[in-house]
Image: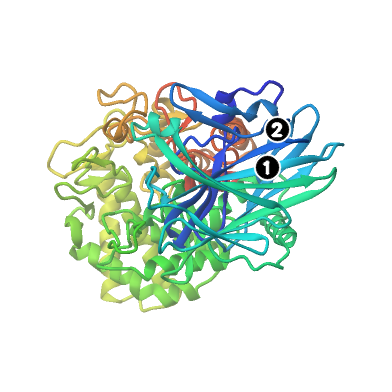
Amino acid sequence: MIDFKQPGFEETSAKEWLITNGIGGYASGTVSGANTRRYHGLLVASANPPTDRSVLVSKIEERIGSGEDEWIDLSSNQFPDNTVHPRGFEHLTGFSASPVPSWEYDTGEHKLKKSILMEYGSNAVIVTYTNIGDATFDLAITPYFVDRDYHALFKVNEQYDFYHEEEAQQLKIHARYGANPLFWFFGKGKFTAQKHWIENLTYTKEEYRGLDFREDARTIGEVTKTIAPGETYHLMFCADKFVVGRRVDKLVAVELKRLKAISQGQDDAFLKDLLVAGEQFIVRRASTDSHTILAGYHWFTDWGRDTMIAMRGLCIATGKKEVSASIINTFLHYLDGGMLPNRFPDDTNQEVEYNTVDATLWLFVAMYEYHLAFDDLDLVKENLDKLGDIIQHHLDGTRYNIHTLDEGFLYAGEEGIQLTWMDAKVDGYVVTPRHGCPVEIQALWYNALKIYLYFFDKVGLAKSDENRNRVLEVSKAIKANFKKHFMNEAGYLNDVVIPGKPADESMRPNQLYALSLPFPLLSKADGKSVFKAVQAQLFTPLGLRTLAPDHPDFKPTYGGNTWERDTAYHQGTIWPFLLGEYYAAQRKLFGNTQKINKEIEANLEPLKKHFYEQDCLHGVSEIFDGSEPRGGRGTAHQAWSVAAVIQTLLAG
């Protein structure tokens, strides 16, 4: 619980909260009650899990009192000219993100606790109010309704009349003619109709991002309920009809029990909370009736690269065998031309994208770690032909000019296409094209070949097989040529090589993969040289910089419009997920000792503080500024950021 003595608007609106429903939907906002992003909403529903997400309920306004003329607001909003109205945050005394977002308010005469959770597997959100004081009070609740794609903003539009029908203990609401209904269950409360447009709600996070930052919302009336000391009152919004007679309190109890079970058996409080946070990314994909991983909240869907990397910490290291196998099968279902998808789009009418050279290679690492964790050879046997097909396409050549060179290296790239994880592209401009042979792609390619050989032999196929022998030859060629082409005189690895041409010697963290993956490409002595260079120029306790500060292209801050943000995205910005590879390399090179583990634990303290006290509470941001990092940037809660910390702690 975070205690507030004299809460300020800036302080409370900078802290975000998030809950999810396991199918791509979520509820999110700030501790102050004022939305600061277009992605905030009390009910963000997924119509085709985990995509087609829409904001249906923006937020709710609450007033508390003991008579018609004695109402005190508990909510907050920001409007133009830095106007904050009402100022309910001033009555906030405490907030907790665990097990679900919960607020405590004290008006001097009355005390109230509010909590929010979602029904798992359903586009439904439940808000619970409890009178924790000694006096009876009246509670008035006014929802702000919108009806829009979660990337968009809602404006006054008379076509949206939010027609409603009152049924037993609930309203059936149609935002406009032909819209799917939204149900608002309010139990024994009393509904009074009164429609208004609320205009110019101001979202400061969107303003910071250089985007349109004002939105309008619609009210249709308020519900009032008298609540006695110790009494609890529930209301619920759902995109599927709520059947009157279902016990909302039982739905709450079921969800609290589910959340508690996620971290059962763990003693470390930080790890327990990380496990619950990590579970928020694991969702069902309707198109395959299997699991997948959302890359980050609030706006990412499931990406091949992010999923393969994040599942190692979120699923494999945590013992989720069935979920891990399901995720692997989800992506193999879309295997095409020897490649996994780069991204599943938000809109189901759009084509699946394949512009990635590393996602498919990460599949081998994930399957190898899956096999070691669960001793399950069946998944390997079922998919060995597909793995062989992937290798064959990469040896012979596939889309985006991905092919193998005589040196064994994997070449990738064509004009206007971004293929590695450093994939920022704005107005057709690829910021870090990295066409050629990027260092981490060679490490992943080498590991894919070695893992394929391991699986090939493990399954018991003939060692004289022609394909096996070709794979063996290429892996040997990579090992023989790697140091010669990538190790430079400064003692670290070049970032991109094209044999016969000058190398890109930019100091970037991608070289860590040559040290951290299951089959390293360097000797321990060379590995230590590389690690120390990375440690000196790129390491911070919050993550690794994507470019050394002394490079002329280094960007110290991330912000501004789309162009400014995307051109800084991989040019110095700090990424927490890289800590997973950094600490894995450190343990491989210097030993998984008590001394090293204590050093890692101490280095994780700033990220731990961020997790509990800053930005998305009980979340880890996607990125931080490359110089003097303070608040998180990018997505507020990123899958591979959380996964990296989980994997690091479990490996100690």
Question: Which of the two residues, 4 or 515, is positioned nearer the viewer here?
Answer: 4
- Classed neighbour count for the residue bearing mark 2: other residues with Cα under 10 Å, few (<14), some (14–19), many (≥20): some
Pointer 1 with pointer 2, Cβ within 8 A: yes
Q: Earlier in the sequence, mark 1 or mark 2?
A: 2
Say whether residue 603 is visible.
Answer: no
Q: Residue furthest right?
A: 134
Residue 470 at x, y = what percent? 25, 67
Q: What kind of residue is marked 1?
A: Ala
Q: Which residue is mark 1?
A: 140
Image height check: is 284 above or below 195? below
Residue 237 at x, y = what percent? 59, 56
Left-right relation of 101 to 290 = right
Residue 190 at x, y = what percent? 69, 52
The Cα atoms of the two marked residues, 1 and 2, are separated by 9 Å
Image quarter in which the C terminus is found: top right
Which residue shows up at 83% across the image and 45% down it? Answer: 228
Which disc, if any, is residue 157?
none
Which residue shows up at 45% across the image and 62% down it? Answer: 47
Question: Which of the two residues, 142 or 311, is positioned nearer the viewer here?
Answer: 142
Q: Give the quadrant of residue 502.
A: top left
Question: Which of the two residues, 566 or 379, is positioned nearer the viewer here?
Answer: 566
Q: Which residue is mark 2?
A: 71
Colour mode? Answer: rainbow
Left-right relation of 301 to 424 = right
Say whether residue 424 is visible.
Answer: yes
- Classed neighbour count for the residue bearing mark 1: other residues with Cα under 10 Å, few (<14), some (14–19), many (≥20): many
Residue 619 at x, y = what percent? 56, 41
